[in-house]
Amino acid sequence: MSDAAPGSALARGRLAFDMQQWAEAYELLRESEAHQPLAGADLHRLAMAAALLGHDRERIEAWERAYHAFLTAGELTGALRTTFWLSVALMSSGEVARASGWFSRGQRLLEAEHGSEHERAYLAIPAALQRLNGGDAQAAMAIFDDVGSVALRIHDRDLETFSRLGGGQSRVLAGDVAGGMALFDEAMLAVTTAEVSPLVVGIVYCGVIEMCERVFEVQRAQEWTTALQRWCDAHAEVVPFRGQCSAFRSQILRLHGAWPDAIAEARRAQEILAGPPPHPALGSTFYYQGEVLRLRGQLAEAEVAYREASRWGRPPEPGLALLRLAEGRTDAAQASIRRVLGEAEDPLTRARLLPAFVAILVAAGHVEEAQGGADELAAIAEQLGVSLLRALAAQSVGRVLLARGRPDAALLALRRAASDWIALEAPYEAACTRALIARACRAVGDADTADLELDAARWALERLGVDPTGLEIEGVAGTGTTAAMPLTPREVEVVRLVAAGRTNREIATALVISEKTVARHVSNILAKLELPSRAAATAYAYEHGIV
């Protein structure tokens, strides 16, 4: 029915929907449907309210009923628009076959009934998404651009904003990061000025922030994550985007050193994304926790988090490989990072893995191979031109130069990296870089500056609640002053304690390992360094800046 008596559940449900009172609208429209069939427009309202409340199954069922109601009433525009929403909703939840079915149904209806340019533009979006998900970014870009032209002519803000989002994603994946970011900024302008409908707001927010994170555009991601948080706070009933917002915030907080808050946000995201059905982003929340735990030196807890991430479909690399490095299992770390990097094809995925690859390979003494990784990362950073990637590349280049016995050249790269990390307000990364700077300064004979840099690095780590030996977690201790350090991170820990005059029993207690394992580490250290005694190992530790 299209009309509703004043004061009826249907009339009150429509009013609640217009006032964006989604929970009340949902209940009243359901109550009304229980007494009489709803018209297509009211079923669409019901589906929208269900979607914003996180009732995924109910939103699909309501849209399916809306499609048939529109069709029965001869309302072509409503029926076609519903196939668009069904296609997009099912595609985003991973139900590709059902999404394709509804898209095909919409296309057939469009051709049979000679739909308008407006409807054709809406149904072009699922077609573009199919091409984008299939790896054909250029074809998707052309479709999204055409949709944008139509949207401008007919003044449809929702359609225009969808086209900007999709066009930006297509450009980024085609290698035009600057062009993609420009379209994202335009889409977000429409979102933040409330020019689009609420469901479009959430979809665009999450799509833009996810892509910014993917291309290391941390400053934009932070700005838009803050905006999304404000929007979620202003719409307390809205559920679907709250989990992604907390997940994105967790990453930003980790970078800025607010680690307890990062863990809390990741766990808050888990509660929301766990479903049912579980959201595809659930695995990432476990990975983000693993990263914080690893950096804090809680290696056993980090491994549990990485395993949970893997169970939910989030690859645990490069974090797990760096965890193995921190445990002193350099061979396992090498095998893992080599495998995942060998499987990675696109530059963005490789850029995410290459910093760990360089750190691990340098720690293992494979400096030439690490050099290739650092060069590749530098080339990607130059192409993308974003601060975070520039910092990672400069740090990796400096690490390799230091390992190759070129401390002067290393200092130039490491100073650039430290400057970028400080500008990005990334205290842990800045501390690791300053520790490398200290090694380079010591290698060129500037002991005073080396002491200052190392003191600053340790102070920063202590403020983060990390023992200064945490510098080894990123493989910092795996780079020597004049050549590749032959010791694993765990062996460096042991030799430091040996140099401090600790007995094997005391070392075992400090590192929570057995005395037998300590004895094996000491034996390996003396053999690798070709030293005759613990006293000689102590001298070596001081001479090479390990202590």
Image: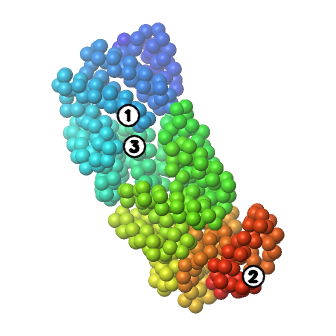
Residue 534 - label: 2
Q: Which residue is tagged 3?
A: 204
Q: Nearer the viewer, mark 3 or mark 1?
A: 1
- Residue 41 lies, in percent from the top left, at 36, 21
Instruction: Give 427 or 397, whichever is nearer the viewer.
Output: 397
Report the residue at 24% width, 46% height from top.
139
Report the residue at 36% width, 68% height from top.
379
Type of amino acid at the residue the image marks with label 1: Val
Instruction: Give 515 or 497, whichever is nearer the viewer.
Output: 515
Q: Are marks 3 and 1 in contact (CB under 8 Å)?
A: no
Tag 2, which secondary structure? helix
**Does the rendering let one see residue 235?**
no
| Separation of residues labelled 2 and 1 (CA atoms) | 63 Å
Q: Which residue is tagged 1?
A: 96
Mark 3 burial class by Cα count in 10 Å: few <14, some 14-19, many 20+: many
- Residue 249 lies, in percent from the top left, at 54, 51
Q: Residue furthest top?
A: 35
Of callouts 2 and 1, which one flags the residue occurring earlier in the amino acid sequence?
A: 1
Quadrant of the snapshot with the C terminus: bottom right
Rendered position, 541 above or below 49: below
Q: Quadrant of residue 453?
A: bottom right
Report the residue at 65% width, 60% height from top.
296
- Residue 374 lies, in percent from the top left, at 44, 71
Type of amino acid at the residue the image marks with label 3: Val
Residue 394 - label: none
- Residue 283 lies, in percent from the top left, at 54, 45
281 to the left or right of 545: left
| Separation of residues labelled 2 and 3 (CA atoms) | 61 Å
Of callouts 2 and 3, which one flags the residue occurring earlier in the amino acid sequence?
A: 3
